[in-house]
Image: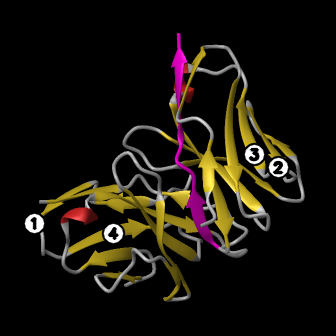
Amino acid sequence: GESVGLHLPTLSVQEGDNSIINCAYSNSASDYFIWYKQESGKGPQFIIDIRSNMDKRQGQRVTVLLNKTVKHLSLQIAATQPGDSAVYFCAENRGGKLIFGQGTELSVKP
Amino acid sequence: EPEVTQTPSHQVTQMGQEVILRCVPISNHLYFYWYRQILGQKVEFLVSFYNNEISEKSEIFDDQFSVERPDGSNFTLKIRSTKLEDSAMYFCASSGIAGASTETQYFGPGTRLLVL
C-alpha cells in the first residue's frame, strides 16, 4: 500500500553541523506534509509543515524542502544543538488522518 | 501556550479489563484524534472525531474501542476488554477550525498503557 517512509533510521552529527533528514512518499496526490520531533517519553511535537504549492519553507533553524517530481521531502536543521537529539518523523495529512513514517533518530555529538 | 493534556500518564491493567484514557484538547479546537505507538514503532492513526461523531477510523479501531466527548473539554478513548497487544503509548491530538485536512495537529504527552 501507499506509505510514507524515511531513508535512514539513525543519523549522528557533530554539534554545530547542519543535519538533513530525508523522507520519501508514494502518493503523488499528497499535498500536505508535516515534520514532528519526538523526544523520549513525549508526544510528537510540531516542527514545520509544507503544502504542495510550495517547494521550500523556512522556520527558526529549520527548513523543509519538497520535491514533488521525485516525491521526496527533507528537513534541514542548521547549527544542530544537543537539544535537537530526538526522533524525527515526517507525516502526511490525508484528509485529516496523519500517516507517519518510521522515524529517524538524530544524535548530536558534543 | 495552549497544549493538549492527557491522563493518566501511565496505566497498568489486567487483560480483559476496561480502560479509559482521558484527554483535554486545546480549548478552541474542533477536531480530535487518537493515535497509538507500539514501543519502537511508528505512530499509527486510530480515529478522528468531529461534531460529536467519528469522522474516520482505522482497521485497528475495532468494536473494542470507543471514543466520547462527555463534556465541553474532555475527549476519551475507551478500550472495553484489553488485550496484550493493546500495550502501547496512546496519543491524543487536536486541530483547529479550518478543517482536519489543512490544520496542524497538536499532540498530548501520551498515556503509556501496559496490559498484563
Which chain is indicated by disc 1? Answer: B
- Residue type for callout 4: Arg
Foreground mark, 2 or 1? 2
Query: How far apart, in angstroms, are the residues tagged by discs 2 and 3?
Result: 9 Å
Which chain is indicated by disc 2? Answer: A
Residue corresponding to mark 2: A70
- In the image, residue A76 lies in the stretch drawn in magenta: no
- Residue type for callout 1: Gln
Foreground mark, 2 or 4? 2
What x and y, as percent, mark residue A47?
65, 44
- Residue type for callout 3: Leu
Dots 2 and 1 on the same chain: no
Of the pair B83 and A41, the residue shown nearer to us: B83
Query: How far apart, in angstroms, are the residues tagged by discs 2 and 1?
Result: 48 Å
Residue corresponding to mark 1: B14
Dots 4 and 1 on the same chain: yes
Residue corresponding to mark 3: A73
The magenta stretch spans which residues?
Answer: A96-110
Query: How far apart, in angstroms, are the residues tagged by discs 1 and 3?
Result: 43 Å
Q: Secondary structure at mark 4?
A: strand
Residue corresponding to mark 4: B22
Q: Quadrant of residue A99?
A: bottom right
